[in-house]
Amino acid sequence: MSDLRELYQELILDHTRKPRNFRRLEGATRKVDGFNPLCGDRVTVYLDLEDDRVKDISFQGSGCAISTASASVMTESVKGKARAEVEVLFQRFHQLVTGKSPATADGAALGKLAVFSGVSEFPVRVKCATLAWHTLRAALNDEAETVSTE
Amino acid sequence: MKLVSDVTAPGGRRTLDGAFDVGKIREDFPILKQRVHGKPLVYLDNAATSQKPQSVIDALTHYYAAENSNIHRGVHFLSVAATEAYEHARARVQQFLNAGHTHEIIFVRQATEGINLVVQTYGRGHVQAGDEVIISAIEHHSNIVPWQMLCEEKGAMLRVIPVNDAGELLLDAYEQLLGPRTRFVSVTHVSNALGTINPIRQMIEMAHRWDVPVLVDGAQAVPHMGVDVQALDCDFYVLSGHKLYGPTGIGILYGKAPLLEAMPPYQGGGDMIRSVTFEKTLYAPLPYKFEAGTPHIAGGIGLGAAIDYLDRIGMQAIGTYEHELLEYATEAIASVAGLRIIGTAREKASVISFVLEGVHPHDIGTILDQEGIAIRTGHHCAQPVMERFGVPATARASLAFYNTREEIDALVVGLHKVREVFG
């Protein structure tokens, strides 16, 4: 059970049960759909971008605990951040869930996102954890097409 | 368990009192001895692909070690041996399906290719603008997309037989769909996502009243029951070897000879010709007309070995055992709080799709995997089925005759663990 507890940490379960910023965002300047065709997980990310900064963000969709919690924590983590900061955060998060974090990585920089470290032990679940992030990046880059993990 | 009939085939796996000896059967499948994450493997993903008995593995090894050669062309010893082994396998498939002739058995890669072959040859020749093709609401994507592509190309319409909340096709609605514009009916024998066994004999008869040919997707049926294509009177029947305890990459298209003879070839190449000049090519007779290029020889031989193995046990005995296991499993997992079974048809093969309140199927799959239990989670290549039942995905346990009640008990314990993790 230890790997499982590592994966399904209390904070993750809490965000799955009560996802934050789970709503349609009125006044969103960008909206992008993300889809994982292998499992059917869907997420829609709403973004209010002002002066290249995430003024507000929300999401909707359906998916597993990991993908829902990841989207939820993501919205909290990127709110108020500049586009370049979001990109740095994504790279660190991606390294974390794929088990490629450099030894010198500063865990504190990830904040709450660090709870997803257990995902690296479950390679097939990496796509669950990154679906919302790929969708957010598409929104930031103003790519209107549906984002697919495949 | 007592069997209704107590005919023990030579080398059959029954004990003296007629019981189905699952312990002995499990010894035939080397992979089942494996441990996963430190736990004994509980393999409940048989609808995705089944495990292979040692005799199938041996047949593949023997072919490559002692018979490997190209077929239908060499005069040398090995080529003759390989050709005989491959054609023997075709004859075994013919007997297994009770087809009238061996030349009605076409080797393809899998059921998917069998369907595409019929769509691209028979379908393209007979379906025109304004025509209709009927499929059902519980098809695998492989029996939706090829027809959809054809209908788009021709300006024809795809009509869908609806399903009730139990997962049973509505035959009254099917009756209404059939008509003068219907050119083809393509329907699954057993639903991969729900386990429903469709009343295909009746459905074929209904289509034939309109002179409409019927293809039956038997990929999920042949592992569970004896199939007699002549008694069904189906025009085409497709199956995948790997779901029938045989190798991947080999499947079967059965077709009635007059239909196959009238159809153009599917692919051009070697082995499917009688003579070639730059002006004109004469095609080979059945079944070779549809078998361009060097086929999966080892796969065909392996499939023949799988059929030999199944014959020794008997499809009737397999069906009886699996049905009892299905009933046991259905009752056992229903004890898990918040669990709902999707697909409750009266006639079902040993497939149980379910959802667990508040837990996504993927999370169920990951947690069960840690217990060594392999199930399928997701949409099962049947997204319209998921939509019909209002779920994004399901968890699916699909049982084979080597599964045991102890394994079902392990599944139930695993599901309680899922509940524990999610609190």
Image: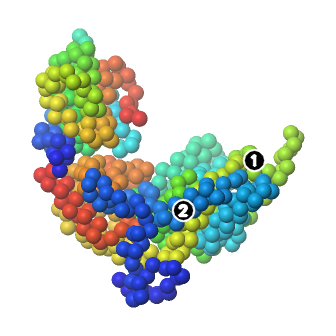
Dot 2 and dot 1 within a common chain: yes
Image quadrant where residue A5 sits: top left
- Expressed as whole percent of the image width and height from the top left, the position of residue B38 reads 26, 54
What is the chain identity of the residue bearing mark 1? B
Rendered image: mark on residue B58: 2
Residue depicted at 66% across the width and 54% down the height: B68
Provide residue A28's location: percent of width, then percent of height: 25, 23
CA distance separating discs 2 and 1: 29 Å
Does B280 appear above or below A72? below
Q: Amino acid at mark 1?
A: Gly
Which residue is depicted at the point 35% across and 83% down?
B1
**Front residue of B382 and B299:** B299
Q: Earlier in the sequence, mark 2 or mark 1?
A: 2
- In percent of the image, x 16 and y 39: which residue is there? A12
| Side of B60 relative to B48 (left or right) | right
Report the label total: 2
Binning the other alpha carbons within 10 Å of mark 2 as few (below 14), some (14 to 19) or many (20 upward) gives few
Q: Residue furthest front?
A: B65
* Label of residue A70 in the image: none
Disc 1 packing (10 Å; few <14; some 14–19; many ≥20) = some
Percent of width and height locating residue B241: 54, 60
| Figure quadrant of the C terminus of chain A | top left
Q: Amino acid at mark 2?
A: Asp
Q: Which residue is mark 1?
A: B270
